């Protein structure tokens, strides 16, 4: 007897999207409003300079299914200010976050907190009679695991920068082409056909 397999909907998983955009006023508002209009919640967003003063890099972490993300990439790439738009895969990219964490402490638990920071290689950047401030840089998963260790402590404040990321290896194919060529190849406009391979 043949066993039937029931396939559920595609997984709604965490995605990291990198955008190279024109370095000008209003770009961030245009990109974030597009994500909002399409119903995507932005988990984190970072904006940084690049080696080209005319170009900025926006890194956005969000959640979505494959088809939804493909459509989002296509629509984002069509913004006039967008030069390159692509998804960063966790296997072939380096993803990092910076965390600042302030925890209440006293003489009774200070040693315990030092031990936790030592295990995760976090820096203690401020020490007061009633609090400690930790600094930790790492993958989002490492940041999450570090924060989990403080469930039983009094966390006073925390701040996460959000994900910033680069692909591994040398210059990648999508970075070597002009923006118009990339858009034509990856995100053809309606009515345009991609050339046969």
Image (cartoon, rainbow, N blue to C red):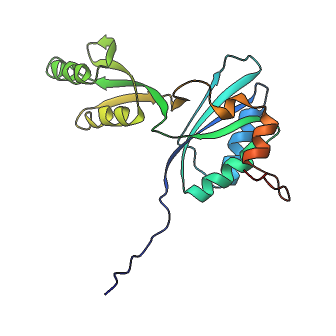
Residue furthest out toward the right? 191
Q: Position of residue 94 (x, y in %)?
A: 48, 29
Q: Is residue 164 visible?
A: yes
Between 38 and 109, the one lying in front of the other is 38
- 106 relative to 61, above or below: above
Going by the picture, which residue comes out furthest to the bottom? 1
Is any part of residue 81 visible from this angle?
A: no
Within the image, what quadrant is residue 42 found in?
top right
- Image side of residue 156 versus residue 62, left or right: left
Q: Quadrant of residue 122?
A: top left
Q: Position of residue 75 (x, y in %)?
A: 74, 49
Q: Nearer the viewer, residue 136 or 68?
A: 68
Q: Residue at x 53, y 29 (%)?
A: 165
Q: Quadrant of the N terminus?
A: bottom left
Return the x and y of residue 117 as percentages of the image width and height.
26, 21
Res 25 quadrant in image: top right
**Which residue of the protein is positioned furthest toward the front in this rendering?**
197
Number of numbered callouts drawn: 0
Q: Residue furthest left?
A: 108
Left or right of 192 in this view: 19: left
Instruction: Tell me which residue sits at (19%, 19%) in the image.
Output: 110
Give residue 163's position: percent from left, percent from top.
51, 32
Q: Nearer the viewer, residue 130 or 111?
A: 111
Q: Is residue 136 left or right of residue 64?
A: left
Q: Is residue 131 left or right of residue 186?
A: left
């Amino acid at each position: 007897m043949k066993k039937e397999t029931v396939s559920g909907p595609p997984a709604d998983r965490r995605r990291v999207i990198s955008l190279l955009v024109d370095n000008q006023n209003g770009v961030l508002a245009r990109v974030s409003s597009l994500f909002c209009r399409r119903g995507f919640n932005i988990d984190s967003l970072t904006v940084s300079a690049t080696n080209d003063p005319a170009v900025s890099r926006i890194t956005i972490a969000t959640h979505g299914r494959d088809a939804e993300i493909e459509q989002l990439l296509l629509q984002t790439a069509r913004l006039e200010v967008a030069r390159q738009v692509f998804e960063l895969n966790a296997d072939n990219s380096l993803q990092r976050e910076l965390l600042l964490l302030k925890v209440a402490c006293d003489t009774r638990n200070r040693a315990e907190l030092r031990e936790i920071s030592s295990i995760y290689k976090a820096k203690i950047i401020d020490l007061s009679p009633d609090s400690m401030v930790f600094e930790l840089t790492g993958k989002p998963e490492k940041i999450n695991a570090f924060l989990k260790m403080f469930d039983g402590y009094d966390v006073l404040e925390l701040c996460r920068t959000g994900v910033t990321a680069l692909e591994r290896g040398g210059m990648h194919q999508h970075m070597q082409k002009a923006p118009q060529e990339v858009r034509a190849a990856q995100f053809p406009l309606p009515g345009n056909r991609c050339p046969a391979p």
